[in-house]
Image: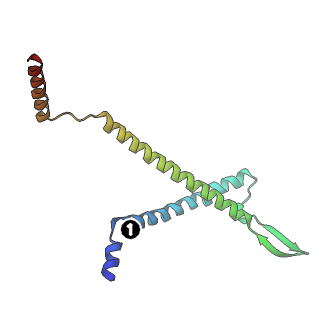
Amino acid sequence: MLKEFKKFAMKGNVIDLAVGIIIGGAFGKIVSSLVNDIIMPLFGLLLGKIDFSNLSYNVMNGEAVMLSIPYGQFIQNVVDFLIISFSIFVIIRFINSLQREEEEAEKKEEPKPSTSEVLLLEIRDLLKANLDQE
C-alpha cells in the first residue's frame, strides 16, 4: 500500500497540483495585503475615512448590545474576491494571448521542403511531363 501511495504521489499531476496550491496560497496573501493595506484604506478615504472592517450593525436591547453584525468584513471580503478574480482573469488572458501569438507564428512559418522532397517533386513533374507527351 505504501508503494502504491508513493507511485500515486510522485505522478506529475499531483506534484503540479501541490505547486499550484502553494503558489495560489502565496498569491492569495499578496492580494489580501493589497486589499487590506492599499485598496480598502483608499476606499475609506474616499468615503470619509471609513474603515470597512470595523463596520457593523448593532441590535440593541435598551442600552445593551444584543447582537453585532459585522457587515464591513463582508464588504471587505467581496472586494478581496473581486480583485483576486480580476487578477486571475488578467493573468490567464495574458497567457492565452502569448499562446495565440505562438500559434499564429507557427502557422505563418510553413516548413520548407527538404532536399529529398524537392528531388521527388522534380521527378514527379518530369514523369508527368513524359506521360503528357506520349
Lateral position of residue 114 relative to residue 77, left or right: left
The single residue placed furthest to the front in the displayed view is 134
Q: Nearer the viewer, residue 21 or 126?
A: 126
x and y percentages locating residue 28 in the rendered image:
53, 62
Q: Secondary structure at mark 1?
A: helix
Q: Is residue 88 above or below residue 17?
A: above
Q: Position of residue 87 (x, y in %)?
A: 53, 52
Kindly give the residue lying farthest to the top in the view shown: 133
Quadrant of the drawing holding the N terminus: bottom left
Q: Is residue 9 above or below residue 26?
A: below
- Residue under the point 31% across and 39% down: 106
Q: Position of residue 24 (x, y in %)?
A: 48, 62
Query: Is residue 112 toward the left or the right of residue 19 in the image?
Result: left
Q: Residue at the far bottom: name it.
A: 1
Q: Residue at horizontal 61%, vertical 58%?
A: 80
Q: Please name whichever residue, 93 or 45, is drawn nearer the observer in this view of the structure.
A: 93
Colouring convention used in this rendered image of the protein: rainbow
Task: Tell me if residue 61 comes above or below residue 79 in the rendering.
Answer: below
Quadrant of the image occupied by residue 23: bottom left
Q: Which residue is mark 1?
A: 14
Q: In this figure, what is the number of numbered marks? A: 1
Determine crowd level at label 1: few under 14, some 14-19, many 20+ residues with C-alpha closer than 10 A.
Answer: few
Specify the quadrant of the image occupied by residue 121.
top left
At x 43%, y 48%, the residue is: 95
The quarter of the rendered structure image containing the C terminus is: top left
At label 1, the amino acid type is: Val
Q: Viewed as shown, does residue 19 lie left or right of 74?
A: left
Tell me where residue 10 sits by quadrant. bottom left
120 in relation to 126, above or below: below
